[in-house]
Amino acid sequence: MLNTSPLNVPAEILATLVEISEEINSSLDLDEVLQKTATLVKRLVDFEIFGVMLLDESTQRLYHRFTIGYGEQASKDWQIPLGQGITGTAAATGRAVRVGDVREDPRYINIIDSVRSELVVPLVVKGQSIGVLDIQSTQVDYFTRDQQSVLTLMASRLAVAIENARLFERVRSQADTLRVLNEVGREANSILDVEELLRRAAELVKRVINYQILGILLYDEATNVFRHRLRDFFDFDYQVECFVPAPKRKYGYFSLPVLIGDTFVARMDSKADRKNKMLIIHNLHFEEVGLNGDMIQKLIDTLKEFILFNQCRAVTFARCNRPDYLNAIESAF
């Protein structure tokens, strides 16, 4: 339900909104701002499920930046295209959307089965939506027009606080990157040993990007291929085979390592068929590591998250060197 009529908010609520505005603008730490927001919203609207979704400008999709009441998997992996679903509609139109019974609204994208009503308010800065504030309830017709009005007023203040915090994060990240680039430049002129230079570069990059695996490949003119000069942070031999001529590939074009904890257990070459919502695993190759039931379950749980992350609904396996492991995995889908 769209609401375009004038807001009618009691004076005591307005006083509370002023207090809220001061609270959320007292920090430039985005996580702290969102945590405060959830606490303050609950003072005005007693929600069961809460989420702040921000817009990724490059993909034009909304992603969860902060949630309460969602499962970890759903909050981490679910992304909503701008204009789709109730949240995407609010972000695209810049108007609040209140739905009394989501089962009767074809726009609703079901993430939590028990949800019955939803109130979504856009976060708008300078006329542009940067995300939405989304609260949900397991009761039909739970949210009122007055609550929508209050949340709309609050969202206007929250949007500015979020944008300020995001700008601060970007500036801080850029400053860190410039510091690292400066150090790399200095050390590039002082370290003459190539391997030592590459290793030091890997250490500096990790300060900016918290990677797990880093490869630096140098071009070999004699063989016309790129070769690894550095494998860092894990004690196993690994190579992305897209750099290997097709006839010599053993595991697959874009075979990636599968780790349980710090243990390298398998290599997986996969591709997402998003049109058919199918994750295709061309090859799942297990290393010579014995897996127990708990490890297999962790692998299954992670694979389910990976399927959702790739916006797929099912998985199919083309090849695997361990039929016993594969049978246990396939039985979970």
Image (cartoon, grey):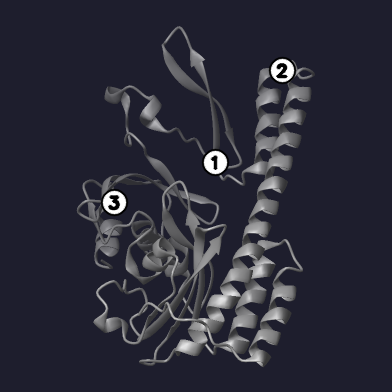
Relative image position of residue 230 (x, y in whole percent) = 58, 29
Locate the C terminus and report the quarter of the image it occupies: bottom left
Q: Does residue 265 appear in this view?
A: yes
Q: Does residue 53 appear in this view?
A: no
Relative image position of residue 214 (x, y in whole percent) = 56, 36
Mark-to-mark CA distance, 2 and 3: 43 Å
Question: In what element is the residue under mark 2?
Answer: loop
The image's mark for residue 213 is 1
Residue at (73% x, 81% y) in the render: 19
Q: Identify the amino acid type marked 3.
A: Arg
Give the answer, above or below, for where 60 lies relative to 153. above
At label 1, counting other C-alpha atoms closer than 10 Å, the crowd grade (few under 14, some 14-19, many 20 or more) is few
Mark-to-mark CA distance, 1 and 3: 25 Å
Of the image marks 1 and 3, the number of the one nearer the N terminus: 1
**In-front residue for pair 149/108:** 149
Disc 2 target residue = 193
The reply to whether callout 2 and callout 3 are in contact (CB within 8 Å) is no
Relative image position of residue 192 (x, y in whole percent) = 74, 15
Disc 3 target residue = 322
Residue at (31% x, 24% y) in the render: 248
Of the image marks 2 and 3, the number of the one nearer the N terminus: 2
At label 3, counting other C-alpha atoms closer than 10 Å, the crowd grade (few under 14, some 14-19, many 20 or more) is few
Of the image marks 2 and 1, the number of the one nearer the N terminus: 2
**In-front residue for pair 161/248:** 161
Q: Is residue 307 left or right of residue 136?
A: left
Q: Identify the amino acid type marked 2.
A: Asp
Q: Quadrant of residue 277?
A: bottom left
Question: In what element is the residue under mark 3?
Answer: loop
**In-front residue for pair 276/300:** 276
At label 2, counting other C-alpha atoms closer than 10 Å, the crowd grade (few under 14, some 14-19, many 20 or more) is few
